[in-house]
Image (cartoon, rainbow, N blue to C red):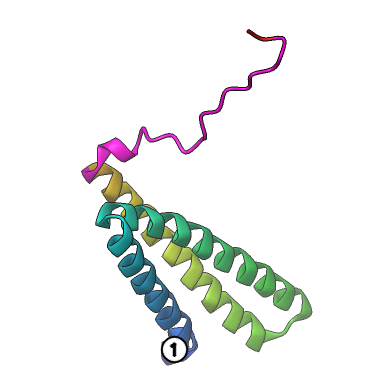
Amino acid sequence: MIGLAARLSRTIPLLIILAALAAVIYLVVSYRRSPARAKEVLIRVFSWLCGAIAAFFGVVSLYAAFEINVAVLELAASFAAVGVVGFGIVRWCNHVFLKNNPHYKSKSQKAKTKHRWPWER
């Protein structure tokens, strides 16, 4: 149990960086747009970020497992766990956000363009 806590304590700098990034993004976007838009941006950014962290450190931990490098495996697995837990939290926050703001659910992100070719009049 103490070994697990010691391994997870190595992820504290990553958690601090993620929290600072979230605070900066939220403050900037809520100042420029609205708090609802800031939450939408945070959900989108952190979905990608936590997914990338989980995937990258998952691959690193698999490589360390094949190389039988226990120290790197434990470190990479703890960072991958942070990514997976963060991704789960972001998805839960997305669910709550869409529940409280249902008009964001039907919002299309695609550009609406009309191609006007010379032969189409």
Q: Identify whether 24 is placed above or below 3.
A: above
Single out the residue that lies furthest toward the left. Answer: 100
Q: Amino acid at mark 1?
A: Ser
Q: Quadrant of residue 59?
A: bottom right
Q: Is residue 2 above or below residue 45?
A: below
User: Considering the numbered disc 1 on the image, is that residue within a helix, a strand or a loop?
Assistant: helix
Residue at x-position 71% and y-position 75%: 65
Lateral position of residue 21 relative to residue 59, left or right: left
Quarter assignment of residue 64: bottom right
Task: Tell me which residue sits at (64%, 80%) in the image.
Answer: 73
In the drawing, does residue 68 fall left or right of residue 49? right
Check the picture and name the quadrant holding the N terminus: bottom left
Task: Give residue 106's position: percent from left, percent from top.
Answer: 36, 32
- In the image, the segment drawn in magenta is 100-119
Q: Is residue 98 above or below residue 51?
A: above
Q: Residues within 10 Å of mark 1 (few under 14, many from 20)?
A: few
Circle 1 is placed at which residue position?
A: 9
Q: Position of residue 79 (x, y in %)?
A: 53, 76
Name, please, the residue furthest toward the right. 67
- Magenta stretch: dominant secondary structure: loop
Assess whether residue 108 is covered by the magenta stretch: yes
